[in-house]
Amino acid sequence: MKNTIWSRLILCFMISIATAFVFLNTYGMNLLKNRLTREQINLLHKEASLIVSVYRGQIFDEGDIEDLASQFTSLDNYLNIRVWIVNRKGDIVADSSNVSSPPNVNINDLDPEFLRKTLSENTMFDNLFYEPMLSIIHRVDYNFQLRGFIVLHSPMSEIEDRTNIYLDVINILFLILFALLFFIFIYIHYITAKPLKSLMKAAKEYSLGNYKYKLNIHGLSEYRDLGAAISFMADEISKLDDYQKKFVANISHDFRSPLTSIKGYAEAMLDGTIPPSMQQKYLNIILFETERLTKLTSDLLELNRFESRSALLDIVSFDINQVIKKTAESFEGICRDKKITLNLVFYSNETYVDADMGKIQQVLYNLIDNALKFSHSNSQIKVTTEEKGDKIFVSVKDYGIGIPKDSIKKIWERFYKTDSSRGKDKKGTGLGLSIAKEIIQAHNENINVISTEGVGTEFIFSLSKTS
């Protein structure tokens, strides 16, 4: 049998039943027998005391002995209690089982210690008993003198029979309980093992890449919650799988294009297709494509550091206004060529924040660079700071083409470009906004976007103000 929950349940069930049955019919039987023996002893003592209290004065009158013995036959017949009247010498003078002819026996001759006891179990006198007896010896005193003894006998077999009857009833009830427990074990198997099999089946399907497999779990809420968690995990893995495929396709595209250009122009110069007089032009193209590959590689490494939580932030207090000015200066040439004005509006002359200055400068660079790409000639880009409570909010707003409504949630994805042809911006890698978001989130701050297609786009992120 396989080592399964069901086999373990059956094994535990059988061991429990066998243990309970053996315990019941050994130790339990002894407890029951001892209890019934004590009850019988109490009954014999009670009957002996009653006989003595009622017949004390006439028990040993010779004329009344036979009459008394006949009165005790009811005990013999109805309670199976044999009564002996024994005189002080130890002679049996009356016997409820033999009223007319009591045994001519002196007990002291059979057992000198018998009459000195109050209780004797498994009593056996040859020619008097045919089976072991439970005996009670009650001393009879009258006028402060020993007159004799009242001895009551009850068969030990009667206690055995009563014990077996009770035990049979208990065993029948035990068998009924056994059947009931069996159904309970089946129910336990149904609510535990069956859902686990469904979960195992789903896990196997998901491991094989079948993320569309539907997992339906019924029963206990814990299993339903676990099933929901596994389904959610499978859905996330499916998304990750799709993302990896897109990632490989995107990065292959972004690497293949410049590599193709570099290879083509290098081969053309080697085989003489491009004359020496034109090589300077194509060497510049090769250098440009090499820079594209370098930037793409750097951006990927940057994102990987943030994703693996290995990017350490150097938090310092600095003037965000100066960082904005310095970053804006690096775009003077592009702004001049595209006739775009960078308008800087600051909340105050100096605005100090606590952050990693180099990383925040990278965020500003990516946001301004992104704004320039999608701004019209003869337009402006507005960079502002605003103080609200213990936060400084930095805004980069352009009045360009805007972002389509269905693309706003996707702009933070790696390699995503709103231009589906991916040819509008040859220099961009599609990673700038992803990097900006990772940096801001690493500071435990937020970055949001507001955009209307054909009107413009505004990016806003928060930083902690220096206290």
Image (tube, rainbow, N blue to C red):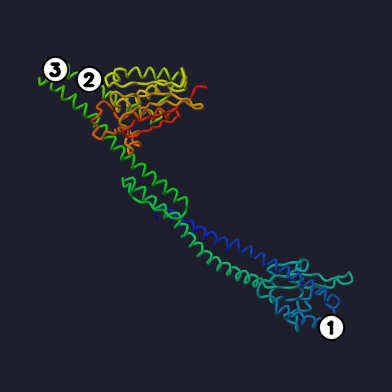
Residue corresponding to mark 3: 278
Q: How many neighbours does mark 1 have within 10 angstroms: few (below 14), some (14-19), or many (20 or more)?
A: few
Question: Where residue 131 sits in the image (x, y, percent)?
Answer: 65, 73
Q: Which residue lies furthest to the top in this view?
A: 277
Question: Toward the viewer: 76 or 43?
Answer: 43
Which residue in the rendered view is the most extreme toward the front? 378
Helix, strand or loop at label 3? It is helix
* Image location of residue 382, percent across then percent down: 37, 24
Q: Is 36 on the left or on the right of 400, as rendered?
A: right
Residue furthest to the bottom: 100
Name the mark nearer the viewer: 2 or 3: 3
Q: In which quarter of the image is residue 219?
A: bottom left
Badge 1 amino acid: Gly
Which of 265 and 67 lies nearest the eye of the viewer? 265
The amino acid type found where label 2 is placed reads: Leu
> How far apart in space, not on screen, are marks 2 and 1 (Cα)?
145 Å
Disc with the residue nearer the chain's start (2 vs 1): 1
Residue lying at the far right in this picture: please name it. 143
For the N terminus, the quadrant is bottom left
Residue at mark 2 to residue at mark 3: CA–CA distance: 15 Å
The reply to whether the C-beta atoms of the residues labelled 1 and 3 are less than 8 Å apart is no
How far separated are the C-alphas under marks 1 and 3? 158 Å
Name the residue tied to disc 2. Answer: 287
Task: Name the residue rendered at 36%, 49% in the picture.
Answer: 202
Q: Residues within 10 Å of mark 3 (few under 14, many from 20)?
A: few
Q: Earlier in the sequence, mark 1 or mark 3?
A: 1
Q: Secondary structure under badge 2?
A: helix
Q: Position of residue 294 (x, y in %)?
A: 28, 23
Report the residue marked by disc 1: 63
